[in-house]
Amino acid sequence: MTPEQFIAFARVLPEPLLLVNSKGEILEINKPVVDILGFSRQEILEKTIFELATEPESKITSYLKACASSRTMVLGSLNINHSNGKTLVFRSQGAVVSPGSKECLALILLRLEERKNANINFILLNKKIEELGREIQRRKEAETALSKANQELELRVEERTIALIETLNELQLTQAQLIQSEKMSSLGQIVAGVAHEINNPINFIYGNIPHLENYIKTLLDFIEKHCEYEPDNCSELQYFREMMDIDFIVKDINKILGSMKFGTQRIQSIVQLLRNFSRMDEAEFKTVDIHEGIDSTLMMLSHRLQGRHYQYPEIMVIKKYGELPFISCYPSKLNQVFINVINNAIDAIEDLVISGHWAKTKSPDINIENQQVQPPTICITTNSIDDNWIEINVTDNGVGIEEHLQNQVFNPFFTTKPVGKGTGLGLAISYQIIVKEHNGHLSFHSIPKQKTTFTIKIPIK
């Protein structure tokens, strides 16, 4: 930097600036230097820094060398005489402008700051730093508060979203339950009506069979007695008796009457099961026999158990009933659970048959008390766990449930069945009925392509 360049640079600055070389010669100054020292510009330029300052020359020389060799600004202090004879204490900041070489000396820019002004500026600077620190702290606190508020808001939104989803699922499940309950109630009323209509003529027929037996016996006795008292006409009666094969009729008519009696008893038994099933329209909490509910459910599903067409085989049902006490429950809702679970067992077997698995491998067996049962089979076992609980197990050797799907089985609207065949509500509603309404337990264990067991545990009271 030349003195002219320094003047152009320093003229606009309000701080005292001196351009010196490494020998201490003053090459140029700006007006604030003249004002603060009280000398004329020419007087100052005719002096060296050693003449202006009161410090020893060696100390000033060391300071100038440090400034010339450093890449950063070097702090120091200078005591300089004022034109009035007073000594002013300055804090100096020196920075090399042009490094020295063999051909020329180093040029150094010195910035002077009077100590009292430096102290004031230092105090002001500290205040500004403190204010800036407080402002930074306030901004950090505001950012932290804003971040915390955003996190809380996101958490609340997430919680609210989860709550809304759960509420929606509950509403959908409740709606499905209401629809299902209404359907089952209507079905129960229809079944009850059909049972009543069948029961009346069957009772009429069954009640008249004993009278018919007596009448036939009386007629046969009369024919025998007639032969005894009318010997002249007996040969003719004997002819007709042999021609009409009366002896065979006498033997066969008893068989016919026995078959009629057995058939009407069977119809009466079916009617009783229908009546038990028709309790599905009852919403009362009452004491019932669980086995009656299972039997009536099996009777209602008998058309599926018997097989349909050539692709669906007949399904064998094995009942291993233990001694169960009567339990307090909602019988209509438990029957609904039995229908859902047994229906799913039938579907699992049919799916395995359709897939051709039984045609490719040996059929998987269900082991019941060390007895190997050949499929397709549904096994229903009941037993008392203790004085407070009963257990119902429904096992099928159907297609099973894949492991990655097992944790979703009881979720509403989850189904592996094709569209139109399953709604995904059967097991979800069953879980609701057993766990929420009866304080029981509903669980399952499944081995894909082998078997599935659903376990229902219900408190006796």
Image (cartoon, helix red, strand yellow):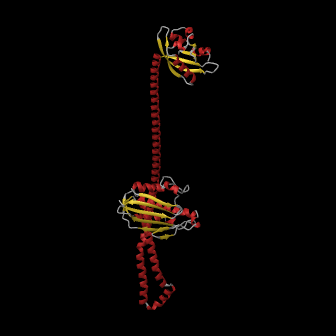
**Horizontal and vertical percent position of residue 441:** 41, 57
**Horizontal and vertical percent position of residue 408:** 49, 54
Classify 156 as above or below 206.
Answer: above
Return the residue nearer the eye: 230 or 140.
140
Query: Is residue 372 shown to the viewer in this render?
Result: yes
**Horizontal and vertical percent position of residue 445:** 47, 60
Q: Quadrant of the N terminus?
A: top right
Residue at the extreme bottom of the image, as rendered: 232
Classify 407 as above or below 317.
Answer: above
Residue at point 49%, 10% (across, down): 82
Return the residue nearer the eye: 272 or 216.
272
Classify 48 as above or below 378.
Answer: above
Q: Quadrant of residue 461?
A: bottom left
Residue at the extreme right of the image, as rendered: 103
The answer to whether 126 appears left or right of 96 in the picture is left
**Horizontal and vertical percent position of residue 39:** 52, 8
